[in-house]
Amino acid sequence: MHADKRMCGLDPDSQFVELAVEVFGLLADATRIRIILALRREEELAVNQLAGMVDRPPAAVSQHLAKLRMARIVSTRQEGQRVFYRLANEHASQLVSDAVLQAEHSLSDHPSHHHSDRTGS
């Protein structure tokens, strides 16, 4: 049972801690966060579609996508000349979502994500 926990990498002395630091470093860029949020909403998108959604030039978005792809955060599918990008798994999406929600806490003691939908208030 204890071996299973060590295998998943969640112990403080895990071999994956240093790699996690690299992931955080890679995600320490607003354009990359926006790309992940955009891909979170859509199944897959081409570079030009992503560029429009994150309001950045396609060449810049392409460079960010290349880094995210090397880190295995995004994966691709080619259709003719077009390349479509999608999140490789749910973890990057969850990580970015949690970071944004944590950021809300820095602005408010009662962030909007803690409020349930209430009618008439």
Image (cartoon, grey):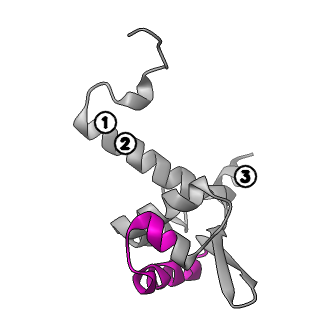
Would you say 92 lies left or right of 88 here?
left
Q: CA distance from mark 3 to mark 2?
A: 29 Å
Evaluate if marks 3 and 2 touch, with contact meaning CB atoms under 8 Å apart.
no
Would you say 78 lies left or right of 70 here?
right
Would you say 28 lies left or right of 64 here?
left
Evaluate if marks 2 and 1 touch, with contact meaning CB atoms under 8 Å apart.
yes
Camera-nearest residue between 45 and 94: 45
Amino acid at the residue labelled 1: His
Residue in the image at 46% along x and 73% along y: 51
Would you say 45 lies left or right of 103 here?
right
**The C terminus appears in which quarter of the rendering?**
top left
Camera-nearest residue between 96 and 5: 96
Q: Which residues are magenta?
A: 50-72
Instruction: Please state the horizontal and vertical placement of residue 116, each as a whole percent of the image.
Output: 48, 19
Camera-nearest residue between 96 and 31: 31
Residue corresponding to mark 2 = 102
Residue corresponding to mark 1 = 105
Q: Please, what secondary structure does the residue beneath circle 3 have?
A: helix
